Amino acid sequence: MNIDLTVFTLASLGIFAITIGGGLLSLHLRNRVPGLGFRDSLRAAVYLTQYEAALEYHGLRRREQRARVNELRANLADSAADGGAAAAIDRLGPPRVLAAEVAGAQMVPSWARGTLWLAAAVAVGVLVLVISTSAFLSAVGSATAPGATATWSPFFVTMTGTPVHSGPPTFTLELPIVTLALLLVPFGLGSRVWRLWTGKRARQVSVHGH
Protein backbone atom coordinates (compact mmCIF):
# COMPACT_ATOMS: atom_id res chain seq x y z
CA MET A 1 0.00 0.00 0.00
CA ASN A 2 1.13 3.54 -0.67
CA ILE A 3 -0.97 6.13 1.17
CA ASP A 4 -0.43 9.18 3.32
CA LEU A 5 -1.78 8.38 6.78
CA THR A 6 -1.59 11.94 8.16
CA VAL A 7 -5.14 12.91 7.23
CA PHE A 8 -6.40 9.43 8.14
CA THR A 9 -4.74 9.68 11.57
CA LEU A 10 -6.25 13.10 12.28
CA ALA A 11 -9.66 11.90 11.09
CA SER A 12 -9.43 8.83 13.33
CA LEU A 13 -8.53 10.99 16.33
CA GLY A 14 -11.44 13.30 15.57
CA ILE A 15 -13.93 10.47 15.18
CA PHE A 16 -12.68 8.84 18.37
CA ALA A 17 -12.98 12.07 20.35
CA ILE A 18 -16.43 12.84 18.98
CA THR A 19 -17.65 9.30 19.71
CA ILE A 20 -16.39 9.36 23.30
CA GLY A 21 -17.69 12.86 23.92
CA GLY A 22 -21.05 12.09 22.34
CA GLY A 23 -21.43 8.90 24.35
CA LEU A 24 -20.64 10.64 27.63
CA LEU A 25 -23.00 13.50 26.81
CA SER A 26 -25.76 11.04 25.90
CA LEU A 27 -25.35 9.19 29.21
CA HIS A 28 -25.38 12.45 31.14
CA LEU A 29 -28.53 13.73 29.42
CA ARG A 30 -30.32 10.40 29.84
CA ASN A 31 -29.49 9.99 33.52
CA ARG A 32 -29.30 13.57 34.73
CA VAL A 33 -31.42 14.54 37.71
CA PRO A 34 -33.34 17.85 37.41
CA GLY A 35 -32.83 20.40 40.15
CA LEU A 36 -29.25 19.50 41.03
CA GLY A 37 -26.16 21.63 40.70
CA PHE A 38 -23.49 20.65 38.19
CA ARG A 39 -21.36 18.65 40.60
CA ASP A 40 -24.27 16.76 42.20
CA SER A 41 -25.90 16.25 38.79
CA LEU A 42 -22.71 14.71 37.41
CA ARG A 43 -22.34 12.49 40.45
CA ALA A 44 -25.97 11.35 40.21
CA ALA A 45 -25.64 10.63 36.47
CA VAL A 46 -22.55 8.49 37.08
CA TYR A 47 -24.32 6.62 39.89
CA LEU A 48 -27.41 5.98 37.77
CA THR A 49 -25.29 4.79 34.84
CA GLN A 50 -23.45 2.32 37.08
CA TYR A 51 -26.75 1.23 38.63
CA GLU A 52 -28.26 0.55 35.20
CA ALA A 53 -25.22 -1.48 34.15
CA ALA A 54 -25.42 -3.51 37.38
CA LEU A 55 -29.11 -4.23 36.78
CA GLU A 56 -28.24 -5.58 33.35
CA TYR A 57 -25.92 -8.16 34.94
CA HIS A 58 -28.85 -9.34 37.06
CA GLY A 59 -30.82 -10.33 33.97
CA LEU A 60 -33.39 -7.52 33.93
CA ARG A 61 -34.85 -6.65 30.56
CA ARG A 62 -34.12 -3.24 29.07
CA ARG A 63 -37.59 -1.87 29.81
CA GLU A 64 -37.47 -2.98 33.42
CA GLN A 65 -33.97 -1.57 33.81
CA ARG A 66 -35.11 1.84 32.64
CA ALA A 67 -38.14 1.71 34.92
CA ARG A 68 -35.90 1.02 37.92
CA VAL A 69 -33.47 3.76 36.92
CA ASN A 70 -36.29 6.26 36.35
CA GLU A 71 -37.72 5.42 39.76
CA LEU A 72 -34.37 6.06 41.43
CA ARG A 73 -33.88 9.27 39.46
CA ALA A 74 -37.27 10.52 40.62
CA ASN A 75 -36.32 9.73 44.22
CA LEU A 76 -33.08 11.66 43.84
CA ALA A 77 -34.98 14.59 42.33
CA ASP A 78 -37.28 14.61 45.36
CA SER A 79 -34.22 14.59 47.60
CA ALA A 80 -32.83 17.54 45.64
CA ALA A 81 -35.95 19.53 46.43
CA ASP A 82 -35.20 18.97 50.12
CA GLY A 83 -31.52 19.87 49.64
CA GLY A 84 -30.26 16.38 50.41
CA ALA A 85 -29.29 14.80 47.08
CA ALA A 86 -25.65 14.24 48.00
CA ALA A 87 -26.59 12.63 51.30
CA ALA A 88 -29.20 10.50 49.53
CA ILE A 89 -26.58 9.16 47.11
CA ASP A 90 -24.31 8.33 50.03
CA ARG A 91 -27.11 6.45 51.79
CA LEU A 92 -27.81 4.34 48.71
CA GLY A 93 -24.46 2.59 48.97
CA PRO A 94 -22.57 1.04 46.03
CA PRO A 95 -24.65 0.70 42.83
CA ARG A 96 -23.95 -3.05 42.57
CA VAL A 97 -25.20 -3.67 46.09
CA LEU A 98 -28.36 -1.68 45.43
CA ALA A 99 -28.95 -3.57 42.17
CA ALA A 100 -28.64 -6.89 44.02
CA GLU A 101 -31.18 -5.74 46.60
CA VAL A 102 -33.61 -4.67 43.87
CA ALA A 103 -33.14 -7.48 41.31
CA GLY A 104 -31.96 -10.42 43.41
CA ALA A 105 -28.56 -11.94 43.98
CA GLN A 106 -28.40 -14.12 40.84
CA MET A 107 -25.89 -12.83 38.28
CA VAL A 108 -25.96 -13.57 34.54
CA PRO A 109 -23.75 -12.61 31.57
CA SER A 110 -24.66 -9.53 29.55
CA TRP A 111 -23.96 -10.09 25.85
CA ALA A 112 -24.91 -6.50 25.03
CA ARG A 113 -22.34 -5.23 27.52
CA GLY A 114 -19.74 -7.60 26.09
CA THR A 115 -20.43 -6.30 22.59
CA LEU A 116 -20.02 -2.75 23.85
CA TRP A 117 -16.64 -3.61 25.39
CA LEU A 118 -15.62 -5.33 22.14
CA ALA A 119 -16.57 -2.28 20.08
CA ALA A 120 -14.60 -0.02 22.42
CA ALA A 121 -11.57 -2.33 22.21
CA VAL A 122 -11.73 -2.38 18.41
CA ALA A 123 -12.00 1.43 18.29
CA VAL A 124 -9.01 1.87 20.59
CA GLY A 125 -7.06 -0.80 18.71
CA VAL A 126 -7.69 0.82 15.33
CA LEU A 127 -6.71 4.23 16.70
CA VAL A 128 -3.45 2.88 18.18
CA LEU A 129 -2.72 0.96 14.97
CA VAL A 130 -3.23 4.02 12.77
CA ILE A 131 -1.04 6.23 14.98
CA SER A 132 1.66 3.52 15.23
CA THR A 133 1.67 2.95 11.48
CA SER A 134 1.87 6.67 10.79
CA ALA A 135 4.82 7.07 13.18
CA PHE A 136 6.55 3.99 11.70
CA LEU A 137 6.22 5.26 8.13
CA SER A 138 7.51 8.69 9.12
CA ALA A 139 10.59 7.04 10.62
CA VAL A 140 11.04 4.80 7.57
CA GLY A 141 10.82 7.72 5.18
CA SER A 142 13.40 9.77 7.03
CA ALA A 143 15.88 7.11 8.16
CA THR A 144 15.82 4.40 5.47
CA ALA A 145 17.34 4.59 2.00
CA PRO A 146 14.96 4.22 -0.96
CA GLY A 147 14.54 0.58 -1.95
CA ALA A 148 15.51 -0.77 1.46
CA THR A 149 12.93 -2.20 3.85
CA ALA A 150 12.30 -1.82 7.56
CA THR A 151 10.19 -4.09 9.76
CA TRP A 152 8.51 -3.40 13.11
CA SER A 153 6.44 -5.88 15.12
CA PRO A 154 4.49 -4.23 17.97
CA PHE A 155 1.60 -5.97 19.76
CA PHE A 156 1.49 -9.07 17.51
CA VAL A 157 1.32 -6.86 14.40
CA THR A 158 4.07 -6.84 11.76
CA MET A 159 4.66 -3.70 9.69
CA THR A 160 7.05 -3.59 6.74
CA GLY A 161 7.86 -0.28 5.09
CA THR A 162 9.80 0.59 1.94
CA PRO A 163 10.63 4.23 1.16
CA VAL A 164 10.32 5.49 -2.42
CA HIS A 165 11.93 8.40 -4.22
CA SER A 166 8.72 10.45 -4.23
CA GLY A 167 5.63 10.18 -2.09
CA PRO A 168 5.00 8.31 1.16
CA PRO A 169 6.64 4.90 1.76
CA THR A 170 4.85 1.74 0.71
CA PHE A 171 3.98 -0.64 3.50
CA THR A 172 2.41 -3.98 4.30
CA LEU A 173 0.57 -4.92 7.47
CA GLU A 174 0.20 -8.45 8.83
CA LEU A 175 -2.40 -9.35 11.47
CA PRO A 176 -2.01 -12.94 12.70
CA ILE A 177 -4.96 -14.93 13.97
CA VAL A 178 -3.79 -14.54 17.57
CA THR A 179 -4.31 -10.77 17.29
CA LEU A 180 -7.94 -11.24 16.30
CA ALA A 181 -8.39 -13.92 18.97
CA LEU A 182 -7.37 -11.37 21.60
CA LEU A 183 -10.64 -9.56 20.87
CA LEU A 184 -12.38 -12.33 22.78
CA VAL A 185 -10.77 -11.00 25.97
CA PRO A 186 -12.69 -7.68 26.18
CA PHE A 187 -15.88 -9.43 25.08
CA GLY A 188 -15.50 -12.05 27.82
CA LEU A 189 -14.66 -9.46 30.48
CA GLY A 190 -17.46 -7.13 29.46
CA SER A 191 -20.12 -9.82 29.27
CA ARG A 192 -18.87 -11.58 32.45
CA VAL A 193 -19.07 -14.84 30.50
CA TRP A 194 -17.92 -16.90 33.51
CA ARG A 195 -21.33 -16.31 35.09
CA LEU A 196 -22.71 -18.95 32.74
CA TRP A 197 -20.96 -21.52 34.96
CA THR A 198 -21.15 -19.77 38.34
CA GLY A 199 -24.87 -19.11 37.86
CA LYS A 200 -25.47 -22.74 36.88
CA ARG A 201 -23.64 -23.96 40.00
CA ALA A 202 -25.60 -21.55 42.18
CA ARG A 203 -28.89 -22.87 40.77
CA GLN A 204 -27.79 -26.46 41.34
CA VAL A 205 -26.88 -25.69 44.95
CA SER A 206 -30.24 -24.00 45.44
CA VAL A 207 -32.09 -27.01 44.02
CA HIS A 208 -30.16 -29.48 46.19
CA GLY A 209 -30.73 -27.26 49.21
CA HIS A 210 -34.49 -27.51 48.75
Image (spheres, rainbow, N blue to C red):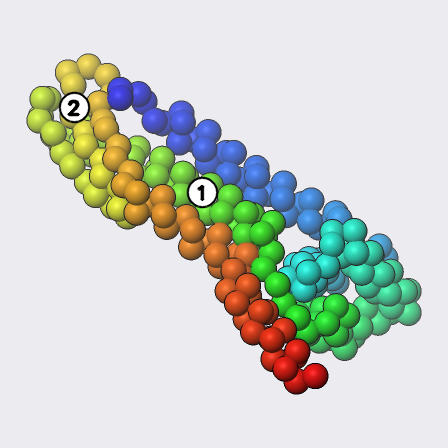
Q: Is residue 153 above or below residue 63?
A: above
Judging by the rendered image, the residue that carries numbered circle 1 is 122
Q: Element type at marker 1? A: helix
* Left or right, residue 30 beside residue 186: right
Relative horizontal placement of residue 196, taking residue 9 as reference (left or right): right
Give the residue at x 37% y 50%.
182
Please identify the residue farthest to the top as the structure is shown. 166
Q: Nearer the viewer, residue 176 or 47?
A: 176
Place residue 102 in its image quadrant: bottom right
Q: Residues within 10 Å of mark 2 (few under 14, many from 20)?
A: many
Q: Is residue 24 above or below residue 161?
A: below
Amino acid, disc 1? Val
Describe residue 99's horizontal placement relative to residue 200 as left or right. Answer: right
Please name the residue shown 9% across and 22% down the image.
147
Is any atom of residue 104 visible in this view?
yes
x, y percentage for residue 206? 65, 79
Identify the residue at horizontal 71%, vertical 50% (top origin). Answer: 28
